[in-house]
Image: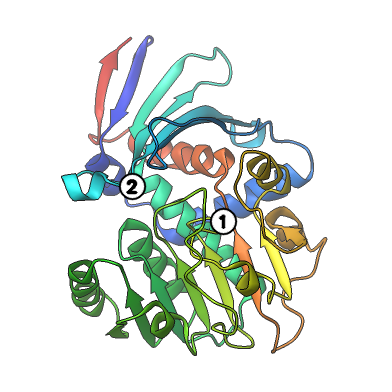
């Protein structure tokens, strides 16, 4: 690395860094503890919405002093992109040196977004799901559905996965790929109900919609189950949400902001945020029968913490391309 150079990491470069999931979970826990202590600077996401099909662009800055990490993710989502052969979520993360504030790295963010989101769900599940959870329902067979299988199967004894998507071909490919990669029985679900019924953990990972299509109804979730709402509340009927004994989020301030712009209009009272669960300030699951839910919107501190780890793993290797500023 020379002065006035920046390391560019493509999607393949980021993947080839080989950052293990346990390292990501540990980094998130450390960052959340620092946030709880007031040591993290992270303004709310700045959003712009383009068109009328729930497309969005988010600017997500954060500074983690203890990791000497600062930067911003500029990320967008277009629900129709997969039909065009493009990822639903795409964007860049820019890291800055924390002494001179020069940009030092720029990396494609799709893998990071998918993996840190799944890691945050899995981390929430360690506090909110039953440890013996063995049946996983996935609604949405895209990138997030796959990353959540990868994360949750590492932390829970998952034996069976039920998968649903509005696109039957996506379900077919998902079940074939997951069956080949993981030691789990994988079953296609013909209806959303089949993907939720009798599952210990449910992940809804469809496109984010400001107005929920409210597919999941009251009574579908089994007693003692946990749900991770990756698509915000898009999949959830208000009556189904009302059945949660504990409803949690990653950042209370952020979800309150999203309520002011039209999202999360029918969620229950928030029991705890992820910082409070990690630090033990609020309890997680307390009984076998509780239905618990987590709506993690994603925080910039997660992206910057993971991006810094990837930068440190790659800066002295032949991974990536150094560019002049």
Counting from the top left corner in percent of width and height, residue 320 is at: 25, 32
User: With 60 as the anchor, is 16 left or right in this view?
Assistant: left
Which is more N-terminal, label 1 or label 2? 1
The front one of 156 and 89 is 89
The front one of 103 and 57 is 57
Element carrying mark 2: loop
Check the picture and name the quadrant holding the C terminus.
top left
Seen at 66% across and 53% down, the residue is 265
Q: CA distance from mark 2 to mark 1?
A: 31 Å
Q: Could you tell me if residue 1 is visible in this image?
A: no
- Say above or below: 315 vs 20: above
Neighbor class of circle 1 (other Cα within 10 Å; few <14, some 14-19, many 20+) is few
Element carrying mark 1: helix
Q: Nearer the viewer, mark 2 or mark 1?
A: 2
Counting from the top left corner in percent of width and height, residue 36 is at: 76, 46
- Say above or below: 306 vs 243: above
Task: Point out which mark residue 79 bears.
Answer: 2
Pointer 2 and pointer 1: residues touching (CB < 8 Å)?
A: no
Seen at 26% across and 17% down, the residue is 323
Q: Could you tell me if residue 303 is visible in this image?
A: yes
Seen at 35% across and 19% down, the residue is 6
Return the residue found at the far right: 281
User: With 19 as the anchor, is 8 left or right in this view?
Assistant: left
Seen at 28% across and 48% down, the residue is 15
Residue marked by disc 1: 26
**In terms of image quadrants, where is residue 270?**
bottom right
- Say above or below: 283 vs 250: below
């Amino acid at each position: 690395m020379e002065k006035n150079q920046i390391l560019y990491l493509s999607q393949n470069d980021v993947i080839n860094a080989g950052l293990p999931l346990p390292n990501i979970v540990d980094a998130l826990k450390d960052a959340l503890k620092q946030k709880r202590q007031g040591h993290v600077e992270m303004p709310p996401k700045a959003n712009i919405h383009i068109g009328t099909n729930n497309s969005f662009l988010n600017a997500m800055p954060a500074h983690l002093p203890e990791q000497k990490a600062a930067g911003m993710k500029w990320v967008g989502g277009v629900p129709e992109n997969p039909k065009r052969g493009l990822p639903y979520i795409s964007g860049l993360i820019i890291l800055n040196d924390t002494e001179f504030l020069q940009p030092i790295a720029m990396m494609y963010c799709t893998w990071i977004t998918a993996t840190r989101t799944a890691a945050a769900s899995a981390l929430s599940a360690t506090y909110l799901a039953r440890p013996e959870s063995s049946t996983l329902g996935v609604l949405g067979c895209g990138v997030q559905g796959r990353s959540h299988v990868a994360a949750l199967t590492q932390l829970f004894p998952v034996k069976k996965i039920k998968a649903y998507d509005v696109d039957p071909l996506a379900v077919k490919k998902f079940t074939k790929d997951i069956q080949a990669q993981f030691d789990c029985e994988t079953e296609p679900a013909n209806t959303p109900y089949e993907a939720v019924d009798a599952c210990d953990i449910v992940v809804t990972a469809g496109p984010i919609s400001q107005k929920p299509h409210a597919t999941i109804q009251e009574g579908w979730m089994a007693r003692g189950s946990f749900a991770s709402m990756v698509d915000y509340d898009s999949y959830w009927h208000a009556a189904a949400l009302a059945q949660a004994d504990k409803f949690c989020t990653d950042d209370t301030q952020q979800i309150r902001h999203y309520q002011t712009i039209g999202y999360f209009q029918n969620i229950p009272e928030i029991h705890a945020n992820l910082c409070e669960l990690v630090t033990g300030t609020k309890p997680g699951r307390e009984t076998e029968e509780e239905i618990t839910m987590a709506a993690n919107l994603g925080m910039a501190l997660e992206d910057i913490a993971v991006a810094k780890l990837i930068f440190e793993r790659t800066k002295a290797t032949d991974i990536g391309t150094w560019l002049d500023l």
